[in-house]
């Protein structure tokens, strides 16, 4: 069974995608990590995020390896596994969203994702997993939540790590990232027409995962002989 899980930042999609992967024992491909790995390498260059282009991205790609595993997507740069925290910062997230505006990269990476997974069962999480990577997926989930709630979750996450943060600033950044994702000229972010939408604004992670798993179980029952 191939399952796609798409949605904006802070919607709770990663928790759900990871949970499904663990429950079903099938590989988890978190596509955002590939965008983040490229963003991470760009930030290390002198030009930083100025004039991000395919010409700048292409030479970096042979340094990055992606390994979908059960409950986790492993990323290697220059042969060494990257610690997740390095890729999860706000700064790298912003860089990833700039990388996402380069259509040649999207075409390249989506082709790579398709080759990585092939005909295998997998949970594929991102922005365009159900629309562009695996439009033929058995189940397409679209996870969403209000921007205010997504900002509150991010704020709480930072506070729990002992990092002072300003909620208004976080909300502005979330809105900016949403806008860049939705308004990019090629491959704008939108739900697949046949996606099942789960709005997590008023429900916790466990309950959201349960809802997603019940959709999966129903589909599995429907497929059983
Ligand atoms: O999913 P995550 O928040 O880690 O992704 C970081 C950024 O990478 C997103 O804001 C988006 O701009 C970009 N991205 C994308 N398409 C994907 C995954 C991520 O454009 N499939």
Image (cartoon, rainbow, N blue to C red):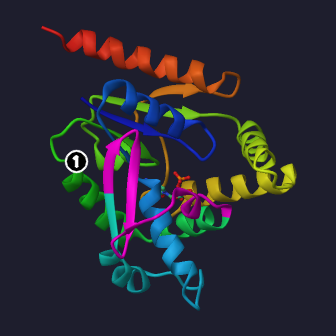
Q: Nearer the viewer, residue 88 or 81?
A: 81
Residue drawn 69% across the image and 59% down it: 176
Asked if ligand 1 lies within 8 A of label 1, the reply is: no
| Residue at image mark 1 | 117
Evaluate whether residue 117 shows in this view: yes
Q: Is residue 109 above or below residue 127?
A: below
From the top left corner, tell me how far across and down residue 77 is, in percent: 39, 71
Image quarter (top left, top right, bottom left or bottom right) of the C terminus = top left
Please provide the residue range marked out in magenta: 67-90
Q: Nearer the viewer, residue 34 or 134?
A: 34
Seen in the image, is 170 located left or right of residue 193?
right
- How many neighbours does mark 1 have within 10 angstroms: few (below 14), some (14-19), or many (20 or more)? some
Seen in the image, is 198 located left or right of residue 126?
right
Q: Is residue 44 above or below residue 24?
A: below
From the top left corner, tell me how far across and down residue 68 is, in percent: 32, 49
Seen in the image, is 190 located left or right of residue 122?
right
Q: Could you tell me which secondary element the residue under label 1 belongs to?
A: helix
From the top left corner, tell me how far across and down residue 142 is, in percent: 48, 34
Q: Quadrant of residue 94?
A: bottom right
Residue drawn 42% across the image and 19% down it: 213
Evaluate whether residue 194 shows in this view: no
């Amino acid at each position: 069974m191939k399952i796609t899980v798409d949605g904006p930042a802070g919607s709770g999609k990663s928790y759900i995608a990871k949970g499904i992967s663990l429950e079903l024992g099938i590989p988890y491909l978190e596509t955002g990590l590939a965008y983040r790995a490229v963003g991470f390498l760009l930030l290390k260059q002198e030009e930083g995020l100025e004039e991000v282009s395919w010409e700048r991205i292409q030479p970096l790609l042979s340094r990055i390896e992606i390994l979908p595993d059960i409950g986790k997507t492993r990323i290697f740069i220059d042969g060494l596994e990257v610690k997740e925290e390095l890729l999860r910062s706000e700064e790298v997230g912003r860089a990833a969203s700039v990388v996402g505006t380069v259509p040649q990269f999207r075409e390249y990476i989506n082709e790579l994702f398709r080759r990585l997974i092939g005909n295998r069962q997998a949970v594929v999480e991102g922005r365009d997993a159900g629309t562009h990577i695996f439009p033929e997926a058995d189940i397409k989930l679209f996870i969403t939540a209000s921007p205010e709630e997504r900002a509150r979750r991010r704020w709480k996450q930072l506070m729990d790590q002992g990092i002072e943060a300003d909620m208004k600033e976080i909300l502005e950044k979330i809105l900016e990232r949403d806008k860049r994702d939705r308004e990019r000229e090629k491959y704008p972010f939108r739900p697949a027409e046949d996606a099942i939408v789960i709005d997590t604004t008023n429900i916790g992670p466990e309950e959201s995962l349960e809802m997603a798993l019940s959709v999966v179980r129903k589909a599995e029952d429907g497929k059983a002989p």
